[in-house]
Amino acid sequence: MPFSTLKAGQALPDWLRPHSFADRPRHTRYTLVHDTDEGRTVLHARDEASTAGLTRELRVDTRSHPLLAWRWKVSRVLDKGDPRTREGDDFAARVYVSFDLDLDALPAGERMQLGLARLIYGARTPLAVLCYVWDARTPRETLMPNAYTDRVRMLVAESGPARVGRWVGMQRNLREDYRRAFGTDPASVNGVIVSTDTDNTGETAEAWYGDITFRAG
């Protein structure tokens, strides 16, 4: 996601696809702004008891480009956030990475369930997702299932208020994290999503996202 190549104030580009939920009337607002600390254009998210994400579909082979790097900044961490519960499944900032999945490598029962989901919802149904979050209290490197589905695994990349208000650089080895989360090697990446959401906790938050890039190992 090369936000720095865009102009502050311009409309979001076509390669960023908004994603919202029909049962959530309030949506996170995303804009392109100039950040004086970074000296470049970044993505700004403003959230008031709302939710929405931005998706970029792309193809990345993790064998040649296993590293995911990004920079983010948040205005605060959430008082009521708790990644282990649906009521607390909110974060000031999160970055999802979705993967293709080798169905033949799964147990027969799970393979049948996922195959049926693809028949019903289409081939673009995400089958395996890593979600990197900035949480309020959970220790860094904690890995857990998402409160809604075990096809999404939450990994705490940053935790607590110590670095609130400052840009924080992240780099993750997707292949290592995927093996921790799912016990197998990953297939290709098929999408990246950024999301700032407070619809469950009813709080407010702001986040800024710098470029999100894939790198060779």
Image: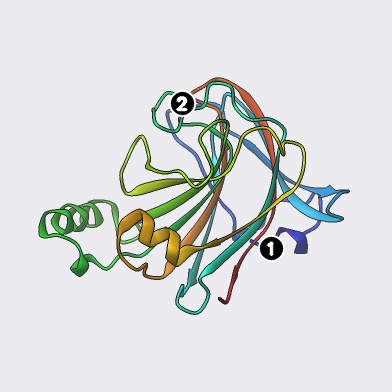
Question: Mark 2 or 1, which is nearer the eye?
Answer: 2
Q: Which amino acid does label 2 sit on?
A: Gly
Q: Which residue is drawn at 60% across and 21% down?
A: 203
Relative to 205, is 181 above or below?
below
Instruction: Give percent across and percent down for residue 101.
Output: 31, 64
The image quadrant that residue 86 belongs to is top left
User: Relative to 39, is 59 on the left or the right?
Assistant: left
Residue 172 is situated, as x and y percent measured from the top left of the image, at: 55, 60
Read off the residue under disc 1.
Answer: 2
User: Of residues 30 and 10, which is closer to you in this image?
Assistant: 30
Residue in view at x 54 percent, y 43 percent: 140
| Secondary structure found at label 1 | loop
Residue with the mark numbered 2: 88
What amino acid type should be assigned to the residue bearing mark 1? Pro
- Mark 2: which secondary structure? loop
Disc 2 crowd, CA 10 A, few/some/many (<14, 14-19, 20+): some
The answer to whether 149 appears left or right of 207 in the picture is: left
Q: In the picture, residue 118 is in which quadrant?
A: bottom left
